[in-house]
Every structure is written in structure tokens, then in C-alpha cells.
Image (tube, rainbow, N blue to C red):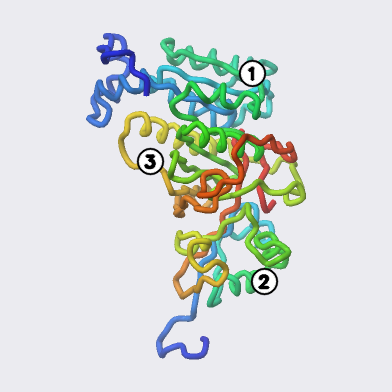
Amino acid sequence: MGEGAGEGELPMSIKVRVPTPLRQVTGGLADVEAAAPSVAECLQELESRFPGFQERVLDETGEVRRFVNLFVNGEDIRFLDGLDTPLKSGDELSIVPAMAGGA
Amino acid sequence: MQTNGHARALTLDQIRRYQRQIIMPEVGSTGQRKLLDSSVLLVGAGGLGSPAALYLAAAGVGKMGIVDFDVVDLSNLHRQILHGHSDIGRPKVESAADRLREINPDLVLATYNEPITSYNAFDIIGPYDVVVNGTDNFPTRYLVNDACYFLRKPLVDGMIFRFEGQATVFQPGSGCYRCLFPSPPPPGAVPSCAEAGVLGVLPGIIGSIQAVEAIKLILGEGAPLVNRLLIFDSLPMEFRQVKIRKDPSCPVCGDEPSITELIDYEEFCGGPAASALS
């Protein structure tokens, strides 16, 4: 439990929804639990657990790739605080890549 | 939706054919007439286009256009239910036309056995009320999005990858595909175009959702999937949604658009499994 966590408070838990193409780095996991105070730190945590995760979401300059979108509780982080968007326990972070398939 | 002067009464055969949807108050004979007077363009007669075309023809959409330059291959048949074993080697638009006319002989059908490009996109899309996108590659996805925006056509979009799919509706003025994904992934970002596979049923679900949305747009009933991206994952069997917004900085439909004409992107990855991140 982090500093300042109140008595009886549950450990922080963010639910990360992993899209199909990224599941090859999460060992097939579609949902991953994380504990981080912002989207950027959440991606760092996931990178430490699943090497290669972050580079598939962020480009060389650390920005979200243009063919990937991140949503916190269904809201696009581009319309929130971007990668600085804060996370709290119970939040859901969805990673949604462009998909081309249709045939 | 085009109407031919005063609304014509339905024929007895039409009443019998469509009675199960006419009896619903959301459709009625007025709604059925809207469907019969409507036109829908399907880009792709493959996984998504198959169920969408079948259901739209059955529902009584009066005019349908189908664009596809491919021929039927044995490996298509586990998911592309417009086509059968005896169609192998035939142009998909021909196979589709036979099947759709069998389902509804009243359907007026136009087939385009050619790739859709910047040269023909406006001519092909122009005559239709609604566009259903069932393409299998990024260049066509962006081309169809941009053309629909420039022509102010509603676009019912769907995408599939393995066990997962997405669907949404872009209505002119409410945002477009580029508000969500401003540009296609660069060639290097899609390292492998090898078949990653798709569950045969998956396009059946997403393509059917596209048919529902097209019918709702024509009828003017219900809440279309506008500003919402529906995400379906068949492994945990979950539907969820995220909000999508019109982006003021969108290169096509934003306040200061940088793209004002159609673009033919390099065909860097045309496989059905193409996906960013893979």
C-alpha cells in the first residue's frame, strides 16, 4: 500500500484492457492489473513487466503513436491530460489500436 | 434518401415479404418504403461485406452497390458467407450478385469489379445514401473515410482482427476516422503482413452490426453508433464502448484541414490481418 493510503483502503488497482495485437507481449493476457498514478507511469510499469509493451504504444519521442489511442474510463486521453492523465483505483485504461481487417 | 415523388404503396408481395419488420412501429410501411427507396454502397464483399450485404438485401434496401476486385478463394469460405464452393475463382462481385438476387429478386444491384482509388472513389460513392466499409487494408480505409467526408456521406465502419472487432458510425460533421487515427501506420510499424487469422464468425457479428446501423440511419430510428467506438472481444465475450470525438485538429474534418483531396497511400500491408501494433 502506498504512502498516505488510508486505513482499510484497498491497494490501488487499475484495469488495463490490452488489445489483441499487444497480447503477444503480455503472454496472451487481455486484462492486466496495474498500480500507477498516471497513464505515463502505468505504461512504464507495464514495460517493466512486459518488455516491448511501451514501444508499441509510444513513439521514439515518448508521444502516443498516431495509430493508437488510449482511453481512461472510455474518455480519450487526448481530450483529458494526455499521458499525464491521473489514474485512481478502479479506473480502466483501454488501449485501442487502428485495425485494418475486414475481409 | 431518394423518394420517387409521392410515397408509393407497397405491393402485396412486398407486404408479405417484409411483414415481420413492417409490423414493428419503428419500421411500419413508411419505414419499409424508406428502405426500398434507399441505396447502400458496400466497400468489400468479404468478411464484413458478406453478412452486411445479405441482411441489407433481405431487409429490402432498394439499391446496393458492391466494390471488390478480388476473386473467391477457398480460404475465404470459412467467413465470407456470400460465396460458396462453386464460386471459387469467380469475381466476388459476380458471386455476391447471384447470392443477393436469390435472396431478394427486387434488389437493384451495381457491381464494381475494380479497386477503389482516388480516381474513381467520388464516382463510385456519389450515388449512394450510406456507405458500409468492409475493406481489409489501411490505404482503402483512409481513402473511403476521406471520400465520404468530402461527399458528406454517412460511413458505417467496421474492423476485425483475430477474435476482436470494432464498429462505429461517422456522420458528416460528427468526426471521422482521422479524428480517431489521424494517419495510417508507417510501413515500418506493421512488420508482418502475414495472416494472423480471424475467427470466421467474428466478421459475421461486426458485419451484422454494420447492417443494423445502416438500417437505423435509413429509418432515422434509434441511436446510431456516432461518437462511440464499439469494441467486441469474442474470447471473454464482451462488448464495450469508448467515446470518440470530433477532433478540431483533424487533418480532414478539423478547423484547419491539411488534407483537401483524396490520397492513394502506398499499399504497404493489404492483408486481412493488418493491424497496428502487431
- Where is residue A66? Give x, y as percent: 63, 54
Crowd tier of the residue under label 1, counting other residues whose Cα lies within 10 Å: few below 14, some 14–19, many 20 or above: some
Residue indicated by mark 3? B224
Q: Any mark on residue A49, and which?
A: 2
Look at the picture and state if B203 lies above or below A4: above
Q: Amino acid at mark 1?
A: Asn
Horizontal side of residue B28 vs A59, given as left or right:
left
- Where is residue B213? Give x, y as percent: 41, 35
Mark 3 and 2 residues: CB-CB less than 8 Å, in contact? no
Q: What residue do we see at 57% from left, 26% from top? A: B122
Crowd tier of the residue under label 2, counting other residues whose Cα lies within 10 Å: few below 14, some 14–19, many 20 or above: few
Q: Are marks 3 and 2 on the same chain?
A: no
Horizontal side of residue B109 vs B69, given as left or right:
left
Q: Amino acid at mark 3?
A: Pro
Crowd tier of the residue under label 3, counting other residues whose Cα lies within 10 Å: few below 14, some 14–19, many 20 or above: some
Tell me the chain of label 1: B
Tell me which corner region of the image, top left, top right, bottom left or bottom right, holds residue A24.
bottom right
Label 2 to label 1: alpha-carbon separation = 49 Å
Q: Secondary structure at mark 2?
A: helix
Examine the rendering and report whether any part of residue B72 can be seen. no
